[in-house]
Every structure is written in structure tokens, then in C-alpha cells.
Amino acid sequence: DVQMTQSPSSLSASVGDRVTITCRASQSVSTYLNWYQQKPGKAPKLLIYAAFSLQSGVPSRFSGSGSGTDFTLTISSLQPEDFATYYCQQSYNTPFTFGPGTTVDI
Amino acid sequence: QVQLVESGGSVVQPGGSLKLSCAVSGFTFSRFPMHWVRQAPGKGLQWVAVISNDGNKKYYADSVKGRFAISRDNSENTMFLEMNGLRVEDRAVYYCTRGNTGTYGAYYFDFWGQGALVTVS
């Protein structure tokens, strides 16, 4: 199975900050890497797919990069509605493993 | 609009059985593979199972293989997860989600239900 790790596990930030979350896969997943946002009590929401493609309707302050084993999710200017937990996920093969999550709070 | 609605969550004793349903609308159900993903209280997301669009291919996480069965009824736009031999560690919110394919074969979960809570106690 492909193991996914994320860093940091949590971070504190302020509105307007630039935030970067990293995700690492235990083996190459090419660009089969997705990012999801989850708020408490809600279902996850797809933000980025294929490492850097922005899902329709997602604000352009979100961006993704990377390939192989190392990936990054960047929020260019943090907004109040962005405080949430972020998960990376590989879709290279089954089981479709998720990272442990990064919580962004104030 | 696209909607996925899970039902069937309940409290069950260890060793018991439960069947979850996921009713979908707003898209051509028979064209898409479907997945179950679960989340234990206060924990991260864990992929559980996938079923192909025609129902002929099914894959499971090792932790549920042999105990859980995924199925679908394309005529009713509904997917199911039959859970047997439930364990305390199966306690979680179970989400159904649609698998979709994008450019260059990208694969992702683009729509999710609100979740169904399964408690094993």
C-alpha cells in the first residue's frame, strides 16, 4: 500500500497569510494526487485533483504542485472560511490512501 | 444538482450486521464508479471499497475484506454497503462518494454524501 504523510499536522495562521502544506507518498504516484478540505461535521470537499488542477468552483487562492512523491498545497491568502482540515489522497492505485490531515486554525 | 444521500446508520453490537444505502440523483449513476470512505470519530479519512460503474468489479480495504460487501442497483440509482462481523473499530461516519476521471486519467472523488454514523457498541 502507498503510505501518505503530511506536514505539519497542524498550524496556526492569520487571515491574509500564505499557507503551505506538504504531502509525501511512500512511492511514486506520478500526479495522481488530490487535495480535500473538510470542516467539522461536514463531508470532505475536493479542492485540487491531479496534483495541480483546480476543481470547478474552488477559489484561485488554492494551488497545488508536485509530482512523484512530494506535493504541496498552497493557500495564497488565507480567508476566514479556509480554517479547516486538509487531506491529500493518492489515486494511483487501490487502496486509495489518504494522508493523516493538516488542521489550519487561528 | 448532484446529491448523494446515505441512510441506514445505526447502533449495533459487536459481531452484528448493518446495511448502508447511498441514493444518488443529478447525474447518470450507471456511468460512474462509486466508493465508500469512512472516518472514525476525531480521526482521518479511510477508503473502504469501490464498485465499478457496471457493478462487475469490486475492491476492498484489507481491514474490511471478507466482512463488507459493496453493491449497486443502477435501475434504482442506489449503492449499498453490507457490513457483517462488525467490530468496535468499524465505528465511523461512512461517506459515499463518486469516483470521476479527468484529464490524463486523473481520478478523484468529486461529490460526497453527508455521511451515515455507524456505532458498534
Image: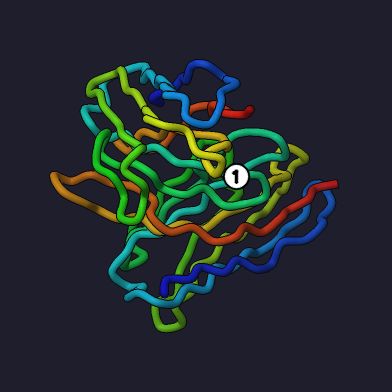
Q: Position of residue A10 (x, y in %)?
A: 59, 21
In the image, taking residue B113 as reference, residue B26 lies left or right, namely: left
Identify the amino acid type marked 1: Lys
Q: Secondary structure at mark 1?
A: loop
Task: Where is residue B50? Give x, y as percent.
Answer: 42, 52
Colouring convention used in this rendered image of the protein:
rainbow
Residue farthest toward the left in the current orientation of the protein: B104
Considering every residue shown, the one lying at the far front of the view is: A16
Please state the total of marks drawn on the protein image: 1
Residue pictured at 82% horizontal, 57% vertical:
B11
Q: Residue furthest bottom?
A: B75
Residue drawn at x 69%, y 67% is: B8
Dot 1 alpha-carbon crowd within 10 angstroms: few under 14, some 14 to 19, many 20 or more = some
Q: Is residue B52 above or below residue A29?
A: below
Front-lying residue, B23 or A70: A70
Q: Nearer the viewer, residue A45 or A89?
A: A45
Question: Position of B38 compared to A86: left or right?
Answer: right
Is residue B11 toward the left or the right of residue B6 in the image?
Answer: right
Q: Which of the 4 quarters of the picture holds residue A11?
A: top right
Image quarter (top left, top right, bottom left or bottom right) of the N terminus of chain B: bottom left
Q: Toward the viewer: A52 or B112?
A: A52
**Residue bearing mark 1:** A39
Q: Is residue B106 visible from the viewing direction of this image? A: yes
Name the residue at 62% across, 57% down: B115
Q: Residue at x 51, y 68 (%)?
A: B4
Q: What chain is tagged by disc 1?
A: A
